[in-house]
Amino acid sequence: MRVPLPALVRVRGRSMLPTYRDGDVLLVVRGVRPRPGRAHVVRLPPDAAGRPRPLSVKRVTGRDPDDPERWWVDSDNAAEGATSFDVGSLADEDIVAVVARLVRRALG
């Protein structure tokens, strides 16, 4: 059994607008099962050049209809950010943490 671990993360970028914006601080919980409909910290696959991507905040929308062992992720901002349409679905180990709440809104 994994013990849930809290952590603070800072949002970078605009892919989760309007829910979260660049600079927001989020309380996340590691070691819990993914919760469809909620925002999560995820590990996306490398980019087209093979470079690793930073951890990202994405919304887990549910299981992949073609592979129910994997998760489908999306951005709240349709104009920006990588989604499962771009990178495919994610394995359980790529869902790092669930967002519990917004701790501090970025200024501006």
Image (tube, rainbow, N blue to C red):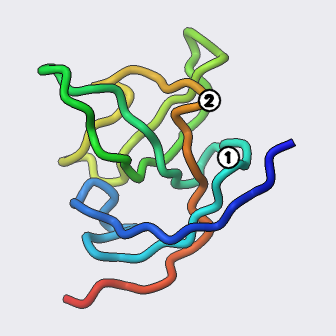
104 left or right, relative to 96: left
Q: Amino acid at mark 2?
A: Asp
Q: Is residue 85 left or right of residue 37?
A: left
In the rendering, which numbered label is found on residue 92? 2
Q: Which mark is residue 35?
A: 1
Q: Which residue occupies 32% across, 24% down?
A: 87
Label at residue 5: none
Residue 28 vs residue 89, the one in the foreground = 28
Q: For marks 2 and 1, give the CA distance.
A: 11 Å
Q: How many marks are shown on the rendered structure?
A: 2
Label 2 packing within 10 angstroms: few (<14), some (14-19), many (20+)? few
Residue 6 point in image, percent of width and height: 64, 67
Place residue 50 in its image quadrant. top left
Relative to 91, is 14 on the left or the right?
A: left
* Picture quadrant of residue 33: top right
- Element under label 1? loop
What residue is at 22 percent from the left and 60 percent from the top? 13
